[in-house]
Amino acid sequence: LARLTGWDFLDLDAHMERTTGASARELFARLGESGFRQLESETFAAALKRSNTILAPGGAVIDRVENQIALAGSTSRLVVFLDAPFRTLIERCVEQERMGGATYRPLLHQTAVAHARYEARRLLYARHAQLTMDVGAKSPQEVARLILDKMY
């Protein structure tokens, strides 16, 4: 989508890692989950102020009320919820981890906990999105074109 629009792409987790000089795993270990989530919220708030940016916030951003409020206040932005079945998302995450292309996900292999968080977050993201798109069987290129159609 960023290539199609000519906009910047910002993956929030990768941005946090670059700006702190520490991996998500290191940050999580050093700050604990609460401190990590606070840093994530601060980084998210700053990222929302950027223009012409496609922002990938990461799944846990929606857990904090201040982030939900920030999304609700983003009326001039298109908030898109990329939905897919739990099994599809877990398989993709495990594959990313296997290929070395994923950020640290401490609960990935605790299936019951991951599923409970998926269900709770799914409702929150759907509530705060202007567009919900089932991406389970779509390629990234298809998704990008569908979103682009909704943007203009």
Image (spheres, grey):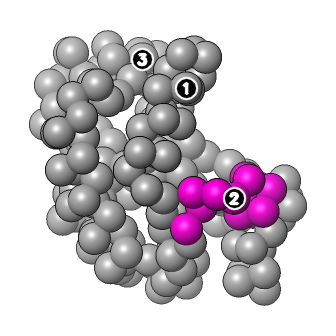
Q: Residue at x 43, y 56 (%)?
A: 85
Is residue 38 depicted above or below 49 in this figure?
A: above
Compare residues 129 and 146 and report the one nearer the observer. Answer: 146
* Residue 99 shows up from this direction: yes
The residue that label 1 is drawn on is 95
Secondary structure at numbered mark 2 = loop
Total marks shown come to 3
Is residue 96 depicted above or below 149 in this figure?
A: above
Secondary structure at numbered mark 1 = helix
Is residue 122 depicted above or below 140 in this figure?
A: below
Please identify, in this view, whether the residue under mark 3 or under mark 2 is nearer the observer. 2
The magenta-colored residue range is 134-144
Q: What amino acid does circle 2 point to?
A: Lys
Secondary structure at numbered mark 3 = loop
Expressed as whole percent of the image width and height from the top left, the position of residue 4 reads 86, 61
Q: Is residue 143 magenta?
A: yes
Is 58 on the left or on the right of 108, as rendered? right
Q: Residue at x 52, y 63 (%)?
A: 82
Locate residue 149: give its quadrant. bottom right
Q: Residue at x 21, y 15 (%)?
A: 29
For the N terminus, the image quarter is: bottom right
Q: CA distance from mark 2 to mark 1?
A: 17 Å
- Mark 3 is surrounded, within 10 Å at the Cα level, by few (under 14), some (14 to 19) or many (20 or more) other residues, namely some
Q: What amino acid does circle 1 point to?
A: Glu
Expressed as whole percent of the image width and height from the top left, the position of residue 152 reads 78, 86
Sooner in the amino-acid sequence: mark 3 or mark 2: 3
* Residue 35 shows up from this direction: no
Q: What amino acid does circle 3 point to?
A: Ser
Q: Residue at x 28, y 70 (%)?
A: 123
